[in-house]
Image (tube, rainbow, N blue to C red):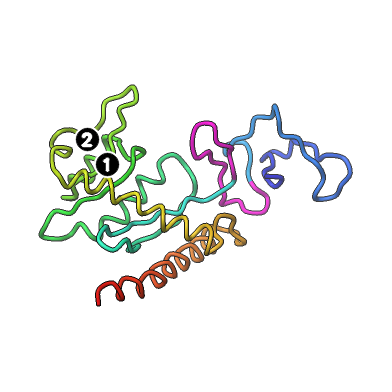
Amino acid sequence: MKSFKSRDSSEEPPPGGGRNSEANFHGRKRSNETHASTTDPDAKLYRKGPGKEAKLCFMGHGLMENRFGLLVGTCLTPANGHAERVAALAMIEPHADRAQVITLGADKAYDAEDFVNELRSMRVTPHVAQNTSGRRSAIDGRTTRHGGYAVSQRIRKRIEEAFGWIKTVAGQQKTKFRGIDRVGWVFNFAAAAYDLVRLPKLLAAAD
């Protein structure tokens, strides 16, 4: 966060202490429009949810098949409020060109009318969790009345196991790399390693 500087260089550096001097950010308005990181300009200030602290980060996205819990698609994007839905459409599109209709499970953050309509136009059934907090959900009875919807809602949470492994075991909660290309490469490598770790267990269970 100390590298997150004003684009017009209007912030005065704190006196003394060299590069690691104390800095007090309280009361200062900081945003991606007015500030940028001097060490990694690709990283964006992003808050994961209400009450969470804002951090400089990227957003890693994963597409999981629901039978064995393997990651079949990953990508890394700049952090913003629309990145998750845009990435999901990009990752599911190669799998949508099939004779049969497929389903896509997702959490409440994906309950947006344009996202749901785009999935349906691709012949992908949106098994998205309904977000009814003071609003109307884009998912209606056409989807929720089927038993497969409940199954998707239960299984989709297994994606968190993959992200948990990538963050902790693969050490990607705080990356050592800079730049979207390098961070994206190591994120994809970590996702591939997760699948390789799971494969022996799946093969043993199949015997």
Q: Is residue 206 left or right of residue 28?
A: left
Query: Which element type, helix, strand or loop, lies under badge 1?
Result: strand
Question: Which residue is the extreme one toward the left?
Answer: 99
Q: What residue did someone put label 2 on?
A: 139
Residue in the foreground of this view, choosing between 62 and 123: 62
Query: Callout 2 environment at 10 Å: few (<14), some (14 to 19), or many (20+)?
Result: many
Residue 119: x and y in percent read: 22, 46
Question: Which residue is the extreme one toward the bottom?
Answer: 207
* Residue displayed at 32% across by 61% down: 69
Kind of residue at badge 1: Val
Quadrant location of the N terminus? top right
Q: Are marks 2 and 1 in contact (CB under 8 Å)?
A: yes
The residues bearing labels 2 and 1 have C-alpha atoms spaced at a distance of: 7 Å
Q: What stretch is highlighted in magenta?
A: 37-55
How many numbered marks, from 0 up?
2
Residue 49: x and y in percent read: 49, 36
